[in-house]
Amino acid sequence: MTATSDARIGAALQELREQVGLTQARLAEAMAARGHAWHQQTVVKTEKGLRPLRLTEACDLATLFHVEVTVLAGLGEVSRPDHLALRGHLDRAEEAERAVAGARAESQAARASLRLAARGVSGLPTDLAARLAAVLEEPTSEPAAGARGDE
């Protein structure tokens, strides 16, 4: 790759990242989650054309941004930036939903082990008994629509 090619790819990467509203740190996290040793500095160097992009990275970035590799290479245009931005928002919302589901499962498992541990314990201090009771109460189902911000 020539410096010009690397610079073109970096500029395209920066444009795509900004259009979907990702910070450099979040992009680095997304790439690290896909198995690449990326940090915010990796994004900085790649966007400035100081670091060449590997093919596997380009493929994962194209998938992440929902574009063809040629667009990432700066050889094509994204015709609808608003669609691209919407995809980015959808990706983040889906990621958050997965995180919430994981946290719910972790919470249920922790409560189950807490129930087992609490069975054989008696004579708890008042503050500990109150905390235990509060944690073991069944959680409310879903927050009201207004509380979630989807009014």
Image (tube, rainbow, N blue to C red):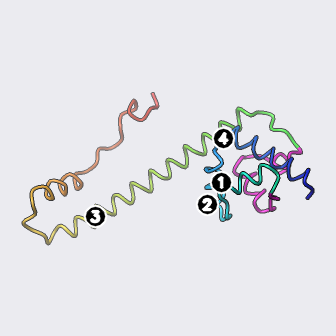
Disc 2 secondary structure class: helix
Vertical relation: 144 (above or below) 93? above
Extreme top residue here? 151
- Identified by mark 1, the residue type is Gln
Residue 92: % across, % down: 57, 45
* Mark before the other along the chain sequence, 1 or 3: 1
Residue under label 1: 40
Mark nearest the camera among 1 and 2 is 1
Q: Residues within 10 Å of mark 3 (few under 14, many from 20)?
A: few
Spatial separation of the CA atoms under disc 3 and disc 2: 30 Å
* Mark before the other along the chain sequence, 3 or 2: 2
Res 112 label: 3
CB under 8 Å between callouts 1 and 3? no
- Identified by mark 3, the residue type is Ala
The kind of secondary structure the magenta stretch mainly shows is helix
Disc 3 secondary structure class: helix
Vertical relation: 68 (above or below) 107? above
CB under 8 Å between callouts 4 and 1? no
> Start and end of the magenta stretch?
51-75
CB under 8 Å between callouts 1 and 2? no
Spatial separation of the CA atoms under disc 1 and disc 3: 39 Å
Q: Residue at point 77% right, 62% down?
A: 56
Q: Is residue 66 magenta?
A: yes
Spatial separation of the CA atoms under disc 4 and disc 1: 22 Å
Q: Is residue 19 left or right of residue 68?
A: left
Res 33 label: 2
Q: Quadrant of the C terminus?
A: top left
Residue under label 4: 87
